Image (cartoon, rainbow, N blue to C red):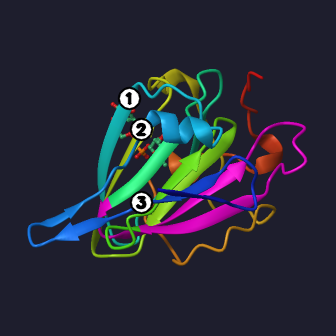
Amino acid sequence: MQFMATELAGVMIIEPDVHEDARGFFMETYVEARFREHGINVAFVQDNHARSARGVLRGLHYQVRHGQAKLLRVVQGEVFDVAVDVRAGSAMFGRWVGCTLSAENRRQLYIPTGFAHGYCVLSDTAEVIYKCSDYYHPEDEGGLIWNDPQVGIDWPVTDPVVSGKDAKHPRLNAIQPPVVEE
Ligand SMILES: Cc1cn([C@H]2C[C@H](O)[C@@H](COP(=O)(O)OP(=O)(O)O[C@H]3O[C@@H](C)C(=O)[C@@H](O)[C@H]3O)O2)c(=O)[nH]c1=O
C-alpha cells in the first residue's frame, strides 16, 4: 500500500499492492495501523455504495457540523474525483485536487473533513464505494456548486447530469463553512 500526498495537504492517494494469481487478485483496501502511520487517524462508521451513469456528477458535498472524512474507490468503471478545501481561513481555501479512480487503477482517495467532495462518471456506468468517519446527517449537508468559476475545477465532462439539489448549491463565497475540530 503506497500513500501519495497531493497538492492539498491531508488529501492522499492510496495505491494498493495487488496480488494476482491464477484465481484472480487480492488486495488490502483498509488497514487501520498503516493508515495511522500516514497520519490518517479516523474511525470509519459508515460505508456507502453508489452507481451512476456516464456524465453524472455528484457533489460537491460536505457536512457542516458532522464532518465526514471519506475513503473512496471505484469497483466498476471510472470517475474523476475531486476534493475542494472549504475550511474558512485555510491558506488553501477554494483550492481543488482531482484524481481518476477506476476499477482498473484500483486507487483510493482519502479526503479529510473540511473538504467538499464530488465526482463525475467517465464510463458507461461507475460504482463508487466509500467509508465515512461520521454518519449521514441530511439536515447538516453543506454544498458548493460544482462549476463555480472561482474554484475552476477542470471537470472532464461538459454539461453533466446533476441532481436538482446539486444544481442549487451556492458559490464558494456564499457557502456555510464546515466546523472543523482541531
Ligand atoms: C449520502 C446519503 C444519502 N442517502 C439517501 C438520501 C437520498 O434519498 C439518496 C441520494 O442522496 P444524495 O443525492 O445526497 O446522494 P449523493 O449525491 O450520492 O451524495 C453523496 O455525494 C458524494 C459526492 C459524497 O461526497 C457523499 O458524502 C454524499 O453526499 O440517498 C442516505 O440514505 N444515506 C447517505 O449517507
Quadrant of the frame with the C terminus: top right
Magenta stretch: give its range.
Answer: 75-101
Contact? badges 2 and 1 (CB < 8 Å): yes
Outermost residue toward the left? 23
Dot 1 beta carbon under 8 Å from ligand 1: yes
Please count the marks in the image: 3
Lower sequence index among marks 1 and 3: 3
- Whether residue 163 sits left or right of residue 27 in the image: it is right
Label 1 neighbourhood size at 10 Å, few (<14), some (14-19), many (20+)? some
- Whether residue 178 sits left or right of residue 13 in the image: it is right
Residue 165 in percent (x, y) is at: 50, 44
Of 104 and 77, the residue lying toward us: 104
The residue that mark 3 highlights is 16
Q: Amino acid at mark 2?
A: Lys
Q: Provide the secondary structure element on which disc 3 rests.
A: loop
The residue that mark 1 highlights is 46
The residue that mark 2 highlights is 131
- Residue at x-position 56% and y-position 67%: 99
Residue 43 in percent (x, y) is at: 49, 25
Q: Is residue 155 visible?
A: yes
Residue 4 in percent (x, y) is at: 62, 60
Q: Provide the secondary structure element on which disc 1 rests.
A: strand
Q: Quadrant of ligand 1?
A: top left
Of 92 and 157, the residue lying toward us: 92
Label 2 neighbourhood size at 10 Å, few (<14), some (14-19), many (20+)? many
